[in-house]
Image (tube, rainbow, N blue to C red):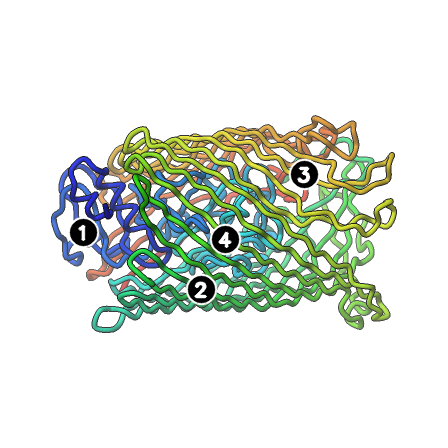
Amino acid sequence: MSVFDQIRAPGSFPRRLAVRRLLLSTMFFGIACAAASPGPALAQNADAEAAKSPATTEAVVLDTIVLSAAGQLPAEYSGGQVATGSGVGLLGNKDIMDTPYSTVAYTESHIQNREAQDIGAVIGATDPSVFVPNKRNIFETYTIRGFSSSADDLLFAGLIGMAPNMRGTTEFAERVEVLKGPSTFLYGMPPGGSVGGAVALVPKRAADQPLTRLTTTYAADSLLGVHADIGRRFGADKEWGLRVNAVSRDGDTATDGEKHGVDMGAVALDWRGDRARVFLDYYKLREDMNGVNYFGVSLGPDVTVLPAARNGENPLAAPWSYNTNETETFVLRSEIDLTDAVTAWASFGRKTGGYDALVTSSMIANNDGDLLVSGIRSKRQGTQESGEVGLRGNFSTGGADHDWTITATHYRSTNTFKDARLGVTSDTNIADPDWGLAPDLTNYDAGGPTQIIGQKLTSIGVGDTISVLQDRLQLTFGLRHQKIESRNVLIDPAGVRSAASTYDSSRTSPAFAVVYKAAENLSFYGNYIEGLSAGQAAPVTAVNAGQVLAPYQTKQVEIGGKWDLGGFTTTLALFQIEKPSAYLDPVSMVYGVYGEQRNRGVEANVFGEIQPGLRLLGGASYIDAKVTSASDPANDGKTAAGTPAFMAKLGLEYDLPSLPGLTLTGNLNHIGKRYANNDNSLSLPSYTVLDLGARYETQISGNPLSLRASVQNVTDEAYWVGGNLSGGYGAPRTLLLSASMDF
């Protein structure tokens, strides 16, 4: 029985879920759907802004569902902050109630309303499983379920490694999707070996309704920006689409001596036919930062008392520090429906660019806060190529439906580094630092590259989701075989290259997942999935010197439930993740995989409208992050450094009934205590940050206008933001303003 037949046949399949399943079947093209409010619903264009004007939607009265023609992604959930589904790698796009993992997809409107200018500001504000340990660091990092990840492992347009170098911006993203937990089966191993989760940037595409939007932004002290967003479709059937985004932002931040500038242009072109679709994405980005850091501060061996945090207006980087980061990327993807039941796709992307940085490296030497300041000069230039081919289809056998996928991925990276650690430039105190003069770079400028690193990742994955009992029970089986190759060459000051250190290994990662729908709006799920990180070579002091260890297999077991109340959804997950590590056994002197960190946790999430005009987005998590086996036996059973045990976050929006168009907003972010070292003798206190704001939506001469204002860290809380002092001080009280008008 086809999905259309199931929709027509009363009682054979819940219509709302059947329509969602039908319309989520392709990654980039299709029709989106969303749960409707009680009463008649509208079939309308998926563009969220166009939907605000009923006069332009060509409404058709249906029963209790919403179909949005020519939508490119899963529709927005009630409240418009998150989507009804997201991409799940090898499994394609899936409705949240059919997804056997913990996922969330933040929408373009949510990103705009948050006035979020980087990825961490999107995924870290309300998700209780995501911890962002720095603000405007030159290398954006975050942890998911207690394990570190970074900008290098972001996906863009479905491909690993095609997101901007080091840091990104949000203006060209239609969605920011987060999958929590290891993801090797779903996406392949990321270049950096992240195992806590996967973050994907979904590029903007042209909707059926023309769009011309101009946004101006301001952030204290004087960070000004302008963003143009233009979308059009062309052709008799609107088969051609063009979306152009351009942003320029520059000025002083709220931290003294810190400057930030971004220039970015992005073009998304697509063509859709009856049985084929083609997508081309291109962007070029340059980011300039001054007075910024990479390391924050480190701790010397004599420090037994941590200094109190100062207000975030105080810098922890010298005014002579800087970073310039450039990225140029294109991604081409094509899809073709070979039959009504089988679709083939292929994609290829290429990224070039790098960074040029002089960063401050400071160490607290003692309990008096004496600070030794030095610098690190670093350049990186590289090229990355990423590709994927695959087949996806479905068939029925007996009483079971099969949704199957076969995919192969390829990633190649070559990076040339030029690094130098510079001498101490200042001996000062963290309470009132004197950063000293910029270090002498004469020797650095005269030298050549110091390191060349090459990496090649290839994989083949297969998966099948078997649905029985009219889709109430869904079983997913699959595996991915991953091959990892790397080459590392060191170059001394005289230009002599060392013998290349090579790595060549492979591993197969199985996966299993189940979804059981106890009711149309209640799902229970469970999964077993693995993550991979490249093994390391034994050091020269080991008995097995030079031996390359097999890739480390991180293993997750998770169970959870999802309850969709129509306008409001709650999810609950319990998980255990075991991540191995290697060290040199001090007795046998054999280098092997002896270490392990085990994170056990529970996370609860809420999102949607609890009543018309009142929206919530947030949750709470508890993680017991234990080092079950450490290189120092004294640290066995200790809590992993830098991991908050408890986090609670809540975003709230309230449409004021007495003033139509006015929305009050608030966001509360609580981060629990973190240990700053492995033996748990030093810890950072918990902190709570409150953001408040408002936005007003109106029209001028028929043109929609959105005005936004928010104050971050209203109470001007002083705190250490990271898992240790390397994250630096938290951002001070900061005013954000923006205005968007559609023409």
Toward which corner of the image does residue 738 lie, by quadrant? bottom left
Q: Which residue is mark 4?
A: 118
Disc 3 marks a residue whose amino acid type is Pro
In what element is the residue under mark 4? loop
Disc 2 from disc 4: Cα separation = 29 Å
Residue 568, placed above or below residue 66: above
Disc 4 marks a residue whose amino acid type is Asp
Q: Which residue is mark 1?
A: 43
Image coordinates of residue 466 in percent, x first then y, are: 38, 41
Query: Is residue 113 at least partly visible in the picture?
Result: no
Disc 1 from disc 2: Cα separation = 32 Å
457 displayed left or right of 103: right
Assess whether mark 4 and mark 1 are in contact (beta carbons under 8 angstroms): no
Q: Which sits in the foreground, 669 or 75?
A: 75
Q: Which sits in the foreground, 644 or 508?
A: 508
- Residue at 30 percent of width and 70 percent of height: 240
Assess whether mark 2 and mark 1 are in contact (beta carbons under 8 angstroms): no
Image coordinates of residue 562 in percent, x first then y, are: 37, 32
Disc 2 marks a residue whose amino acid type is Ala
| Quadrant housing the C terminus | bottom left
Q: Which residue is mark 3?
A: 580
Q: Which residue is mark 2?
A: 346
Disc 2 from disc 3: Cα separation = 34 Å
